[in-house]
Image (cartoon, helix red, strand yellow):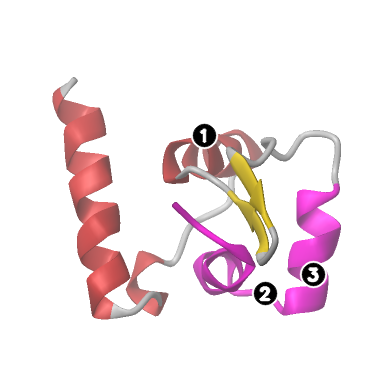
Amino acid sequence: MLGNAELGRLLGVTRQRVSQIVSGPDFPRPRFTLIMGSVWALDDVQEWADRKGRTLHLDALTPDVQDDVKLQLRSRRDS
């Protein structure tokens, strides 16, 4: 699961740019909207990035989040 900060790191953009991107009509809808903000699933964001020809910078995430992302990607490939 990804919040605005993780999206910014993955995309290599500022918080302001994240706000513009997520409000676009083709960006996936958040899975949850909490008081702290919206939360997106990595799979949804990866599919969007693939369609747009964008690269996600997984190495920009913290080690704990990187591990979670790698597990999600591995399980997606295995299914």
Using the rendered view, name the quadrant where residue 53 is placed. top right
> The residue under label 1 is which amino acid type?
Glu
Image quarter where the C terminus lies is: top left
The x and y percentages for residue 21 are: 78, 55
Residue at the front extreme, as displayed? 35
| Residue that badge 1 annotates | 47
- Few, some or many C-alpha atoms within 10 Å of disc 1 (few <14, some 14-19, many ≥20)? some
Q: Is residue 11 magenta?
A: yes
- Few, some or many C-alpha atoms within 10 Å of disc 2 (few <14, some 14-19, many ≥20)? few
- Which element type, helix, strand or loop, lies under badge 1? helix
Using the rendered view, name the quadrant where residue 67 is placed. bottom left
Q: Which residues are magenta?
A: 1-23
Q: CA distance from mark 1 to mark 3?
A: 19 Å
| Residue that badge 2 annotates | 13
Using the rendered view, name the quadrant where residue 58 is placed. bottom left
In this rendering, is residue 8 above or below 42? below
Q: Judge left or right: residue 9 versus residue 4.
A: left
In this rendering, is residue 14 above or below 47? below
> The residue under label 3 is which amino acid type?
Arg
Q: CA distance from mark 1 to mark 2?
A: 18 Å
Residue drawn at (51%, 34%) of the image: 47
Say whether disc 1 or disc 3 marks the residue closer to the N-terminus: 3
| Residue that badge 3 annotates | 17
